[in-house]
Image: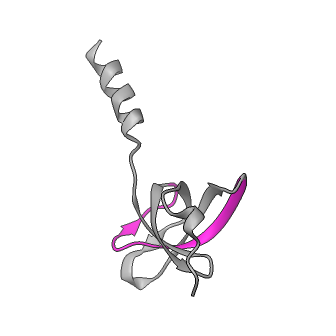
Amino acid sequence: MQQDEAVIGCTGELLLPTRGAAGPGEILVRVRGGSETFLAWSSQPLPKGATVLVVESRGCREVDVIEWVDPLDALDGDADGAG
């Protein structure tokens, strides 16, 4: 299967939760000037609504994801808490 290189490194939101080894969820990713859905696989279960990072393409509209916290959002939270 040919990988979809454009989606690797993109972030998205889980529309359906992942179940780890038990099965995929579904992710909505902004890519190629629009939004596309992919089956999303993760090593650990992740909840619906989680922000995830695409780390690998399995081809055929399937990707591997990990949970993602935007470091810039984390910095904004620290600044608000410090003042």
Q: Is residue 60 left or right of residue 70?
A: right
In the image, 54 versus 78, the foreground residue is: 54
Residue lying farthest to the right in this orientation: 34
Question: In the rendering, at what x and y percent does residue 19 appear?
Answer: 42, 75
Seen at 50% across and 77% down, the residue is: 24
Please report the residue visible at 40 percent of the width from the left and 52 percent of the height from the top: 68
Residue at point 55%, 55% (across, down): 12
| Quadrant in which residue 31 is drawn | bottom right
Quarter of the image holding residue 3? bottom right
Quarter of the image with the N terminus in it? bottom right
Instruction: For the C terminus, give its image quadrant.
Output: top left
Say whether residue 14 is visible. Answer: yes
Residue 21 x, y percent position in the rendering: 37, 82
Q: How is the image coloured?
A: one colour
Q: Nearer the viewer, residue 82 or 1?
A: 1
Reply yes or no: does residue 39 show up in magenta: yes
Magenta: predominant secondary structure element? strand
Residue 15 position, x and y percent, is: 59, 62
Please report the residue visible at 34 percent of the width from the left and 71 percent of the height from the top: 44
Spot the residue most to the top.
83
Q: Is residue 77 magenta?
A: no
Q: Which residues are magenta?
A: 34-49
Q: In this image, 80 relative to 5: left or right? A: left
Q: Is residue 77 above or below residue 68?
A: above
Would residue 45 appear left or right of 12 to someone viewing this image? left
